[in-house]
Amino acid sequence: MGRPKGSKNVFSTQIKHNCIFCNKEFTATPSRKVVKYCSYKCYWKDMKGTISSFKGKKHSLESKNKISLAGIGKHVGSKNARWKGGRYITKFGYVLIKAHGHPFLNKMGYIQEHRLVIEKHIGRYLTRKEVVHHINGIKTDNRIENLMLLPSLSAHVKLHRHLAS
């Protein structure tokens, strides 16, 4: 059932409004939203004042330092409620250990445990090219007897091809 003949579409008519920010008169079609501003420029100018009023108290440099020092180290590492010992297993099955100051850490500050075991055994950091192979194939078995250091990824691939044949 449609609109009766001769009646006007309510949404095609223009209604005069006054902008609540600059008080300029403008026309707009009625809609579900209540029209308050003549332009986005006035809207954002008005909102800027509103948003800045929520910012709150200005702190002195001394009080800012006290606030920042109170939060440092409060919930880091073992002080955090979700701390699980700095060790977890990735979706690929490798064990990662939290290690501070290591040159090859990931973004989260972890390194693969099998690389740490080999590094401790040989007494130096591994290069990025060197690969550690798990002899028995169990990626969580990081005993030194189960690990083999290979010079490159290609050597590791060749070893797997040799083992498969």
Image: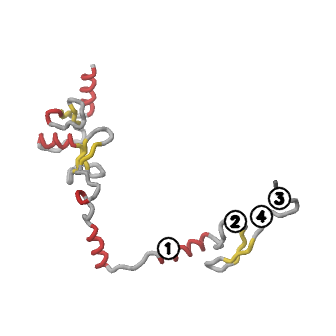
Q: How crowded is mark 2: few (under 14 residues within 10 Å), some or many (20 or more)?
A: few
- Which label belongs to residue 102? none
- Which label belongs to residue 12? 4
User: Could you tell which of marks 1 and 3 lies nearer the N-terminus?
Assistant: 3
Residue 157, horizontal then vertical, whole percent: 28, 29
Q: How far apart are marks 1 and 3 (CA)?
A: 44 Å
Residue 113, horizontal then vertical, whole percent: 21, 43
Q: How far apart are marks 4 and 2 (CA)?
A: 10 Å
- Which label belongs to residue 51? 1
Horizontal relation, residue 123 to residue 50: left or right: left
Horizontal relation, residue 137 to residue 124: left or right: right
The residue carrying mark 3 is 3
Q: Would you say the residues marked 2 and 3 are in contact, meaning their CB atoms lie under 8 Å apart?
A: no
- Indicate the quadrant where residue 74 lies: bottom left
Amino acid type at circle 2 is Ser
Query: Which residue corresponds to the image point at 81% horizontal and 54% vertical from the top-left?
Result: 1
User: Could you tell which of marks 1 and 2 lies nearer the N-terminus?
Assistant: 2
Q: Can residue 33 be seen in this view?
A: yes
The residue carrying mark 2 is 31
User: Could you tell which of marks 4 and 2 lies nearer the N-terminus?
Assistant: 4
Amino acid type at circle 1 is Ile
